[in-house]
Amino acid sequence: MMSDQDPSRMDATAQGELVLSGSASPVELVDAAIERAERVNPEVNAIIHELYDEAREQAAGELPDGPFRGVPFLLKDLGAGLAGQPYHMGMQALKDADFRLPMDTYLGVRFRDAGFVTIGKTNTPELGILPTTEPRAYGATRNPWNPGHSAGGSSGGSGAAVAAGIVPVAHANDGGGSIRIPASHNGLVGLKPTRQRTTQGPLIGDALSGLTEELVVARSVRDVAAVLEEVHGAVPGDPYFAPAPERPYTDEIGADPGKLRIGITVDAFVEQEVDPRVQESARKAAKLLEQLGHSLDEDTPQVPPTEAGGPEDLIESFMTRWQAGQAASLDQFGHILGRRLGPDDVEPLTWALAREGRRKSAGEYLNAVAVHQGLSRLVSGWFQQGHDLLLTPATGEPAPALGTFDDSGPDPLSAIERARKTAIFNALFNATGHPAISVPLYATEDGLPTGVQLVAPQGREDVLLRVACQLEEALPWADRHPTVWAGEAAETV
Protein backbone atom coordinates (compact mmCIF):
# COMPACT_ATOMS: atom_id res chain seq x y z
CA MET A 1 0.00 0.00 0.00
CA MET A 2 2.91 2.33 0.74
CA SER A 3 4.98 1.57 -2.36
CA ASP A 4 4.70 5.11 -3.72
CA GLN A 5 5.36 6.78 -0.36
CA ASP A 6 8.65 7.64 1.37
CA PRO A 7 7.82 8.13 5.05
CA SER A 8 11.40 9.15 5.82
CA ARG A 9 10.63 12.45 4.08
CA MET A 10 7.38 13.00 6.02
CA ASP A 11 6.89 14.54 9.41
CA ALA A 12 4.86 12.78 12.08
CA THR A 13 1.68 14.65 11.19
CA ALA A 14 1.90 13.48 7.58
CA GLN A 15 2.61 9.90 8.61
CA GLY A 16 -0.40 9.96 10.92
CA GLU A 17 -2.52 11.20 8.03
CA LEU A 18 -1.35 8.23 5.93
CA VAL A 19 -2.81 5.87 8.51
CA LEU A 20 -5.99 7.91 8.92
CA SER A 21 -6.60 7.92 5.17
CA GLY A 22 -5.83 4.22 4.79
CA SER A 23 -2.82 4.92 2.57
CA ALA A 24 -0.54 3.08 4.99
CA SER A 25 -0.95 0.81 7.97
CA PRO A 26 0.78 1.16 11.34
CA VAL A 27 2.66 -2.07 10.64
CA GLU A 28 4.01 -0.65 7.37
CA LEU A 29 5.17 2.56 9.04
CA VAL A 30 6.82 0.71 11.91
CA ASP A 31 8.48 -1.87 9.65
CA ALA A 32 9.85 0.91 7.46
CA ALA A 33 11.24 2.78 10.47
CA ILE A 34 12.90 -0.37 11.82
CA GLU A 35 14.47 -0.99 8.42
CA ARG A 36 15.83 2.55 8.41
CA ALA A 37 17.15 2.12 11.94
CA GLU A 38 18.91 -1.13 11.07
CA ARG A 39 20.52 0.57 8.09
CA VAL A 40 21.84 3.80 9.60
CA ASN A 41 21.91 3.39 13.37
CA PRO A 42 25.31 1.62 13.24
CA GLU A 43 26.67 4.86 11.78
CA VAL A 44 25.24 7.21 14.42
CA ASN A 45 24.64 5.02 17.51
CA ALA A 46 21.42 6.83 18.37
CA ILE A 47 19.27 3.85 19.43
CA ILE A 48 20.70 1.80 22.30
CA HIS A 49 17.67 -0.32 23.22
CA GLU A 50 15.90 -1.98 20.30
CA LEU A 51 12.21 -2.58 21.02
CA TYR A 52 11.45 -3.80 17.52
CA ASP A 53 9.52 -6.98 18.36
CA GLU A 54 7.18 -5.32 20.82
CA ALA A 55 6.74 -2.38 18.44
CA ARG A 56 5.65 -4.70 15.65
CA GLU A 57 3.28 -6.47 18.02
CA GLN A 58 1.83 -3.15 19.18
CA ALA A 59 1.43 -1.88 15.61
CA ALA A 60 -0.45 -5.04 14.62
CA GLY A 61 -2.86 -4.70 17.56
CA GLU A 62 -5.41 -2.19 18.73
CA LEU A 63 -3.87 1.27 18.89
CA PRO A 64 -5.26 4.40 20.55
CA ASP A 65 -7.12 6.61 18.11
CA GLY A 66 -4.79 9.60 18.49
CA PRO A 67 -3.47 11.87 15.73
CA PHE A 68 -0.21 9.89 15.60
CA ARG A 69 -1.78 6.46 15.41
CA GLY A 70 0.88 4.04 14.16
CA VAL A 71 3.66 6.64 13.84
CA PRO A 72 7.07 5.24 14.91
CA PHE A 73 8.62 6.98 17.90
CA LEU A 74 11.66 6.82 20.16
CA LEU A 75 11.91 7.45 23.88
CA LYS A 76 15.06 8.90 25.39
CA ASP A 77 16.63 6.57 27.96
CA LEU A 78 16.07 9.17 30.66
CA GLY A 79 12.79 10.66 31.82
CA ALA A 80 9.48 9.52 30.35
CA GLY A 81 9.04 5.79 29.74
CA LEU A 82 6.82 2.75 30.03
CA ALA A 83 6.86 -0.10 32.52
CA GLY A 84 9.24 -2.93 31.72
CA GLN A 85 11.40 -0.95 29.31
CA PRO A 86 15.17 -0.67 29.93
CA TYR A 87 16.06 2.45 31.86
CA HIS A 88 19.77 3.08 32.27
CA MET A 89 20.27 6.87 32.01
CA GLY A 90 23.73 6.31 30.52
CA MET A 91 24.92 4.53 33.68
CA GLN A 92 26.98 1.36 33.50
CA ALA A 93 25.70 0.27 36.93
CA LEU A 94 22.08 0.33 35.73
CA LYS A 95 23.08 -1.36 32.48
CA ASP A 96 24.83 -4.15 34.38
CA ALA A 97 21.74 -4.59 36.58
CA ASP A 98 19.43 -4.63 33.51
CA PHE A 99 17.30 -2.10 35.35
CA ARG A 100 13.81 -1.51 33.95
CA LEU A 101 11.13 1.03 34.73
CA PRO A 102 8.81 -0.34 37.41
CA MET A 103 5.77 1.62 36.16
CA ASP A 104 4.52 3.85 33.37
CA THR A 105 5.24 7.56 33.61
CA TYR A 106 2.32 9.85 32.90
CA LEU A 107 4.12 11.37 29.94
CA GLY A 108 4.99 7.95 28.55
CA VAL A 109 1.30 7.07 28.66
CA ARG A 110 0.36 10.32 26.93
CA PHE A 111 2.80 9.60 24.10
CA ARG A 112 1.25 6.15 23.76
CA ASP A 113 -2.30 7.51 23.90
CA ALA A 114 -1.43 9.92 21.10
CA GLY A 115 -0.90 6.82 18.96
CA PHE A 116 2.90 6.69 18.86
CA VAL A 117 4.55 3.27 18.64
CA THR A 118 7.90 3.22 20.44
CA ILE A 119 10.48 1.25 18.45
CA GLY A 120 13.43 1.89 20.77
CA LYS A 121 15.17 4.06 23.31
CA THR A 122 17.89 6.57 22.57
CA ASN A 123 21.35 7.25 23.91
CA THR A 124 22.05 9.87 26.58
CA PRO A 125 25.11 10.97 28.56
CA GLU A 126 25.35 9.62 32.08
CA LEU A 127 22.49 11.17 34.09
CA GLY A 128 22.01 13.68 31.28
CA ILE A 129 24.87 15.80 32.59
CA LEU A 130 26.75 16.94 29.49
CA PRO A 131 25.72 18.73 26.26
CA THR A 132 27.15 15.82 24.30
CA THR A 133 26.10 12.17 24.18
CA GLU A 134 29.20 10.09 24.82
CA PRO A 135 28.48 7.78 27.77
CA ARG A 136 31.04 5.11 28.55
CA ALA A 137 28.21 2.63 29.01
CA TYR A 138 26.99 2.90 25.40
CA GLY A 139 29.56 4.88 23.42
CA ALA A 140 29.26 8.09 21.47
CA THR A 141 26.30 9.17 19.38
CA ARG A 142 27.59 10.72 16.17
CA ASN A 143 26.16 13.75 14.41
CA PRO A 144 24.53 12.76 11.09
CA TRP A 145 25.78 15.98 9.47
CA ASN A 146 29.39 15.14 10.35
CA PRO A 147 29.97 11.88 12.27
CA GLY A 148 33.16 13.25 13.79
CA HIS A 149 31.13 15.82 15.72
CA SER A 150 28.80 15.72 18.69
CA ALA A 151 25.05 15.22 18.28
CA GLY A 152 24.56 17.34 21.38
CA GLY A 153 23.16 16.33 24.71
CA SER A 154 21.62 15.21 26.69
CA SER A 155 18.99 14.28 24.09
CA GLY A 156 21.65 13.60 21.48
CA GLY A 157 20.44 10.10 20.64
CA SER A 158 16.97 11.42 19.89
CA GLY A 159 18.36 14.32 17.89
CA ALA A 160 20.58 12.11 15.74
CA ALA A 161 17.79 9.58 15.12
CA VAL A 162 15.35 12.23 13.91
CA ALA A 163 17.96 14.09 11.85
CA ALA A 164 19.04 10.83 10.18
CA GLY A 165 15.44 10.10 9.16
CA ILE A 166 14.84 7.03 11.34
CA VAL A 167 11.74 8.54 12.96
CA PRO A 168 10.05 11.91 12.42
CA VAL A 169 9.95 12.89 16.09
CA ALA A 170 11.47 11.61 19.35
CA HIS A 171 11.17 12.25 23.07
CA ALA A 172 13.64 14.67 24.65
CA ASN A 173 14.02 16.61 27.89
CA ASP A 174 15.88 19.71 28.95
CA GLY A 175 17.53 20.64 32.25
CA GLY A 176 20.12 23.05 30.86
CA GLY A 177 19.59 23.01 27.10
CA SER A 178 19.14 19.29 26.47
CA ILE A 179 16.29 19.76 23.97
CA ARG A 180 17.54 22.95 22.33
CA ILE A 181 21.21 21.94 21.99
CA PRO A 182 20.56 18.67 20.07
CA ALA A 183 17.93 20.50 18.01
CA SER A 184 20.49 23.13 17.03
CA HIS A 185 23.33 20.67 16.40
CA ASN A 186 21.15 18.34 14.30
CA GLY A 187 19.09 20.86 12.31
CA LEU A 188 15.78 20.23 14.12
CA VAL A 189 13.04 22.05 15.99
CA GLY A 190 13.22 21.78 19.77
CA LEU A 191 10.85 23.44 22.24
CA LYS A 192 11.52 23.57 25.97
CA PRO A 193 8.07 24.36 27.35
CA THR A 194 7.19 26.50 30.34
CA ARG A 195 8.03 24.90 33.68
CA GLN A 196 5.57 22.06 34.43
CA ARG A 197 3.81 22.36 31.08
CA THR A 198 4.30 18.58 30.93
CA THR A 199 4.25 16.32 33.96
CA GLN A 200 7.18 14.24 35.19
CA GLY A 201 5.10 12.07 37.52
CA PRO A 202 4.46 9.75 39.14
CA LEU A 203 8.09 8.97 39.99
CA ILE A 204 9.29 12.60 39.90
CA GLY A 205 7.66 15.83 41.01
CA ASP A 206 10.19 18.40 39.84
CA ALA A 207 13.65 17.26 38.78
CA LEU A 208 16.31 19.54 40.30
CA SER A 209 13.58 21.73 41.84
CA GLY A 210 12.07 22.61 38.49
CA LEU A 211 15.04 22.92 36.13
CA THR A 212 13.88 20.13 33.81
CA GLU A 213 11.05 20.02 31.27
CA GLU A 214 10.14 17.32 28.72
CA LEU A 215 8.81 17.24 25.17
CA VAL A 216 10.36 16.22 21.81
CA VAL A 217 12.74 17.10 19.00
CA ALA A 218 11.14 17.14 15.55
CA ARG A 219 11.61 18.14 11.94
CA SER A 220 8.58 20.46 11.73
CA VAL A 221 6.99 23.12 13.89
CA ARG A 222 3.53 21.64 13.35
CA ASP A 223 4.71 18.33 14.85
CA VAL A 224 5.95 20.14 17.95
CA ALA A 225 2.61 21.90 18.30
CA ALA A 226 0.60 18.71 17.77
CA VAL A 227 2.65 16.69 20.26
CA LEU A 228 2.45 19.47 22.85
CA GLU A 229 -1.31 19.56 22.40
CA GLU A 230 -1.51 15.82 23.14
CA VAL A 231 0.75 15.69 26.19
CA HIS A 232 0.54 19.01 28.04
CA GLY A 233 -1.09 19.47 31.41
CA ALA A 234 -0.26 18.85 35.05
CA VAL A 235 -1.71 16.00 37.09
CA PRO A 236 -2.91 16.11 40.71
CA GLY A 237 0.09 16.34 43.01
CA ASP A 238 2.42 18.11 40.57
CA PRO A 239 4.32 20.87 42.42
CA TYR A 240 3.68 23.58 39.81
CA PHE A 241 1.01 24.47 37.26
CA ALA A 242 1.82 26.25 34.00
CA PRO A 243 -0.74 28.82 32.79
CA ALA A 244 -3.39 27.12 30.67
CA PRO A 245 -3.28 27.81 26.91
CA GLU A 246 -6.06 29.95 25.49
CA ARG A 247 -6.74 27.51 22.63
CA PRO A 248 -5.26 24.31 21.14
CA TYR A 249 -1.59 24.59 20.24
CA THR A 250 -2.38 23.20 16.80
CA ASP A 251 -4.41 26.36 16.11
CA GLU A 252 -1.20 28.38 16.26
CA ILE A 253 0.20 26.80 13.08
CA GLY A 254 -0.24 29.35 10.32
CA ALA A 255 -1.75 31.92 12.67
CA ASP A 256 -0.64 35.52 12.22
CA PRO A 257 1.64 36.48 15.13
CA GLY A 258 1.08 40.18 14.45
CA LYS A 259 3.89 42.71 14.68
CA LEU A 260 6.05 41.75 17.66
CA ARG A 261 8.73 43.59 19.57
CA ILE A 262 11.77 41.31 19.84
CA GLY A 263 14.95 41.90 21.77
CA ILE A 264 18.18 40.40 20.46
CA THR A 265 21.52 39.56 22.00
CA VAL A 266 24.39 37.65 20.43
CA ASP A 267 26.48 37.91 23.58
CA ALA A 268 26.23 35.68 26.62
CA PHE A 269 24.47 36.90 29.76
CA VAL A 270 27.65 36.20 31.74
CA GLU A 271 31.29 36.40 30.74
CA GLN A 272 31.82 33.72 28.08
CA GLU A 273 33.28 33.65 24.59
CA VAL A 274 30.70 32.92 21.87
CA ASP A 275 31.54 31.46 18.46
CA PRO A 276 31.14 34.15 15.76
CA ARG A 277 29.35 31.67 13.49
CA VAL A 278 26.37 31.27 15.82
CA GLN A 279 26.33 35.02 16.44
CA GLU A 280 26.04 35.57 12.69
CA SER A 281 23.13 33.13 12.51
CA ALA A 282 21.26 35.13 15.14
CA ARG A 283 21.95 38.38 13.31
CA LYS A 284 20.63 36.91 10.06
CA ALA A 285 17.54 35.67 11.89
CA ALA A 286 16.99 39.19 13.22
CA LYS A 287 17.07 40.59 9.68
CA LEU A 288 14.63 37.92 8.54
CA LEU A 289 12.25 38.74 11.39
CA GLU A 290 12.41 42.41 10.45
CA GLN A 291 11.55 41.51 6.86
CA LEU A 292 8.54 39.62 8.26
CA GLY A 293 7.32 42.82 9.90
CA HIS A 294 8.63 42.54 13.44
CA SER A 295 10.52 45.20 15.39
CA LEU A 296 14.01 44.25 16.64
CA ASP A 297 16.13 46.05 19.22
CA GLU A 298 19.09 45.29 21.44
CA ASP A 299 17.26 45.87 24.73
CA THR A 300 17.61 42.56 26.64
CA PRO A 301 17.24 41.31 30.23
CA GLN A 302 20.22 42.42 32.29
CA VAL A 303 21.50 39.73 34.62
CA PRO A 304 22.93 41.64 37.60
CA PRO A 305 26.73 41.53 37.76
CA THR A 306 27.93 39.76 40.88
CA GLU A 307 31.14 38.63 42.44
CA ALA A 308 32.31 35.49 40.62
CA GLY A 309 31.76 32.42 42.75
CA GLY A 310 29.45 34.19 45.16
CA PRO A 311 26.01 32.81 46.05
CA GLU A 312 24.33 35.22 43.62
CA ASP A 313 26.47 34.21 40.65
CA LEU A 314 24.33 32.66 37.90
CA ILE A 315 26.75 29.90 36.97
CA GLU A 316 27.73 29.05 40.55
CA SER A 317 24.09 28.90 41.66
CA PHE A 318 23.17 26.72 38.68
CA MET A 319 26.06 24.38 39.46
CA THR A 320 24.95 24.14 43.10
CA ARG A 321 21.58 22.82 41.96
CA TRP A 322 23.17 20.59 39.31
CA GLN A 323 25.66 19.11 41.79
CA ALA A 324 22.94 18.46 44.36
CA GLY A 325 20.92 16.69 41.69
CA GLN A 326 23.72 14.25 40.90
CA ALA A 327 24.28 13.52 44.58
CA ALA A 328 20.58 12.81 45.02
CA SER A 329 20.48 10.60 41.91
CA LEU A 330 23.37 8.44 43.10
CA ASP A 331 21.73 8.05 46.50
CA GLN A 332 18.42 7.08 44.89
CA PHE A 333 19.94 4.52 42.55
CA GLY A 334 22.03 3.16 45.41
CA HIS A 335 18.78 2.39 47.22
CA ILE A 336 17.36 0.75 44.09
CA LEU A 337 20.46 -1.39 43.53
CA GLY A 338 20.77 -2.27 47.20
CA ARG A 339 24.27 -0.87 47.68
CA ARG A 340 25.98 2.48 47.99
CA LEU A 341 27.38 3.63 44.66
CA GLY A 342 31.05 4.56 44.62
CA PRO A 343 33.48 6.26 42.24
CA ASP A 344 34.03 3.06 40.25
CA ASP A 345 30.30 2.88 39.43
CA VAL A 346 30.09 6.17 37.55
CA GLU A 347 32.11 8.40 35.27
CA PRO A 348 34.69 10.75 36.86
CA LEU A 349 32.62 13.87 36.17
CA THR A 350 29.49 12.37 37.73
CA TRP A 351 31.39 11.46 40.87
CA ALA A 352 33.05 14.87 41.09
CA LEU A 353 29.71 16.66 40.77
CA ALA A 354 28.07 14.39 43.35
CA ARG A 355 30.99 14.93 45.73
CA GLU A 356 30.54 18.69 45.45
CA GLY A 357 26.79 18.31 45.91
CA ARG A 358 27.32 16.45 49.17
CA ARG A 359 29.84 19.03 50.36
CA LYS A 360 27.51 21.98 49.99
CA SER A 361 24.94 22.80 52.63
CA ALA A 362 21.16 22.76 52.44
CA GLY A 363 21.29 26.52 52.94
CA GLU A 364 23.50 26.96 49.88
CA TYR A 365 21.03 24.93 47.84
CA LEU A 366 18.06 27.02 48.96
CA ASN A 367 20.01 30.20 48.28
CA ALA A 368 20.67 28.99 44.73
CA VAL A 369 16.97 28.30 44.18
CA ALA A 370 16.14 31.75 45.56
CA VAL A 371 18.64 33.39 43.19
CA HIS A 372 16.96 31.68 40.24
CA GLN A 373 13.51 32.69 41.41
CA GLY A 374 14.77 36.26 41.51
CA LEU A 375 16.10 35.90 37.98
CA SER A 376 12.71 34.58 36.90
CA ARG A 377 11.07 37.75 38.20
CA LEU A 378 13.74 39.86 36.48
CA VAL A 379 13.23 38.22 33.07
CA SER A 380 9.44 38.24 33.46
CA GLY A 381 9.60 41.94 34.32
CA TRP A 382 11.57 42.62 31.14
CA PHE A 383 8.82 40.99 29.08
CA GLN A 384 6.14 42.94 30.94
CA GLN A 385 7.87 46.19 30.02
CA GLY A 386 7.00 45.68 26.36
CA HIS A 387 8.89 42.87 24.66
CA ASP A 388 7.13 39.87 23.18
CA LEU A 389 10.18 37.66 22.50
CA LEU A 390 13.93 37.46 23.00
CA LEU A 391 16.22 36.22 20.20
CA THR A 392 19.64 34.63 20.88
CA PRO A 393 21.87 32.00 19.31
CA ALA A 394 20.55 28.57 20.27
CA THR A 395 24.00 27.48 21.44
CA GLY A 396 27.32 29.16 22.07
CA GLU A 397 29.00 27.19 19.28
CA PRO A 398 28.22 24.76 16.45
CA ALA A 399 28.52 21.06 17.26
CA PRO A 400 32.04 20.50 18.65
CA ALA A 401 34.17 17.49 17.82
CA LEU A 402 33.59 14.25 19.70
CA GLY A 403 35.93 14.00 22.67
CA THR A 404 35.72 17.72 23.48
CA PHE A 405 34.18 17.07 26.90
CA ASP A 406 36.74 14.54 28.14
CA ASP A 407 36.62 14.04 31.92
CA SER A 408 39.47 11.53 32.20
CA GLY A 409 42.14 14.05 33.21
CA PRO A 410 43.21 15.15 36.69
CA ASP A 411 40.26 17.57 36.98
CA PRO A 412 37.02 15.92 35.82
CA LEU A 413 35.10 19.14 36.46
CA SER A 414 36.92 20.71 33.52
CA ALA A 415 34.44 18.84 31.28
CA ILE A 416 31.46 20.65 32.77
CA GLU A 417 33.35 23.95 32.66
CA ARG A 418 33.95 23.37 28.93
CA ALA A 419 30.21 22.68 28.55
CA ARG A 420 29.47 26.27 29.54
CA LYS A 421 30.31 27.49 26.03
CA THR A 422 27.78 25.16 24.41
CA ALA A 423 24.93 25.81 26.87
CA ILE A 424 25.54 29.47 27.69
CA PHE A 425 22.27 30.68 26.10
CA ASN A 426 20.13 27.85 27.47
CA ALA A 427 20.53 27.28 31.20
CA LEU A 428 19.21 30.70 32.26
CA PHE A 429 15.75 29.80 30.98
CA ASN A 430 15.77 26.47 32.79
CA ALA A 431 16.47 28.47 35.93
CA THR A 432 13.66 30.97 35.20
CA GLY A 433 11.13 28.51 33.74
CA HIS A 434 10.47 30.48 30.53
CA PRO A 435 9.63 28.60 27.31
CA ALA A 436 12.26 28.65 24.57
CA ILE A 437 12.48 27.14 21.10
CA SER A 438 15.40 26.39 18.78
CA VAL A 439 14.71 26.56 15.04
CA PRO A 440 17.18 25.36 12.36
CA LEU A 441 17.54 28.32 10.03
CA TYR A 442 21.23 28.33 9.11
CA ALA A 443 24.48 26.36 8.92
CA THR A 444 28.22 26.92 8.96
CA GLU A 445 30.29 26.90 5.77
CA ASP A 446 31.24 23.28 6.47
CA GLY A 447 27.62 22.22 6.87
CA LEU A 448 27.03 22.07 10.62
CA PRO A 449 23.54 23.35 11.55
CA THR A 450 23.28 26.45 13.76
CA GLY A 451 19.91 27.02 15.35
CA VAL A 452 18.56 30.25 16.76
CA GLN A 453 16.66 30.49 20.04
CA LEU A 454 13.48 32.41 20.74
CA VAL A 455 12.33 32.92 24.34
CA ALA A 456 8.81 33.95 25.38
CA PRO A 457 7.04 35.01 28.56
CA GLN A 458 5.98 32.17 30.83
CA GLY A 459 3.00 30.33 29.42
CA ARG A 460 3.35 31.78 25.90
CA GLU A 461 4.33 28.76 23.84
CA ASP A 462 1.61 29.95 21.49
CA VAL A 463 3.69 32.97 20.45
CA LEU A 464 6.79 30.83 19.96
CA LEU A 465 4.90 28.41 17.73
CA ARG A 466 3.38 31.17 15.59
CA VAL A 467 6.73 32.85 14.96
CA ALA A 468 8.62 29.57 14.49
CA CYS A 469 6.03 28.56 11.90
CA GLN A 470 6.43 31.94 10.19
CA LEU A 471 10.22 31.39 10.03
CA GLU A 472 9.74 27.86 8.72
CA GLU A 473 7.57 29.18 5.89
CA ALA A 474 10.05 31.96 5.07
CA LEU A 475 13.15 29.74 5.11
CA PRO A 476 12.02 26.10 4.78
CA TRP A 477 14.29 23.38 6.10
CA ALA A 478 12.27 20.21 5.41
CA ASP A 479 14.32 19.19 2.35
CA ARG A 480 17.70 19.63 4.00
CA HIS A 481 19.15 16.26 4.97
CA PRO A 482 22.49 15.27 6.47
CA THR A 483 25.30 13.08 5.20
CA VAL A 484 23.99 10.09 7.16
CA TRP A 485 20.39 9.87 5.95
CA ALA A 486 18.06 6.89 6.01
CA GLY A 487 15.80 8.07 3.20
CA GLU A 488 16.30 8.80 -0.46
CA ALA A 489 19.10 11.19 -1.41
CA ALA A 490 18.12 14.84 -1.06
CA GLU A 491 19.65 18.27 -0.78
CA THR A 492 22.00 19.03 2.10
CA VAL A 493 22.72 22.40 3.63
Image: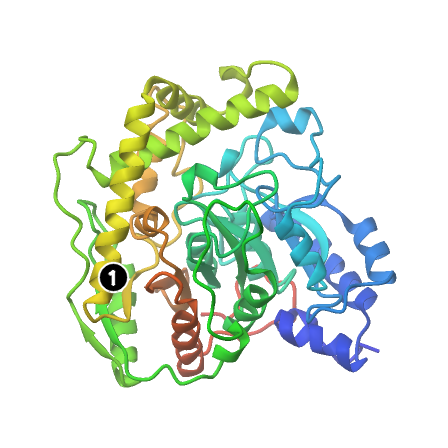
The percent coordinates of residue 251 (x first, y second) are: 52, 79
Query: Quarter of the image holding residue 15?
Result: bottom right
Q: Residue type at mark 1? A: Gln
In which quadrant of the rendered image does the C terminus lie? bottom left
Q: Secondary structure at mark 1?
A: helix
In which quadrant of the rendered image does the N terminus lie? bottom right
User: Which residue is at a point 41% across and 60% down the rendered structure image?
Assistant: 448
Vertically, is 3 above or below 427? below
User: Which residue is at a point 27% across and 32% down the rendered structure image?
Assistant: 367
Left or right of 393, for residue 57: right
Q: In this view of the protein, which residue sits in the foreground, 109 or 20?
A: 109
Q: In this view of the protein, which residue sits in the foreground, 354 or 282?
A: 354
Which residue lies under the disc numbered 1?
279
Left or right of 333, for residue 456: left
Q: In this view of the protein, which residue sits in the foreground, 456 or 416?
A: 456
Q: In this view of the protein, which residue sits in the foreground, 399 or 302?
A: 302
Residue 346 in view in this figure: no
Left or right of 296, for residue 138: right
The percent coordinates of residue 276 (x first, y second) are: 23, 58
- Hey, which residue is sitting farthest front in the picture? 236
Query: Quarter of the image holding residue 89?
Result: top right
User: Which residue is at a point 53% across and 67% down the rendered structure image?
Assistant: 224
Vertically, is 1 above or below 106? below
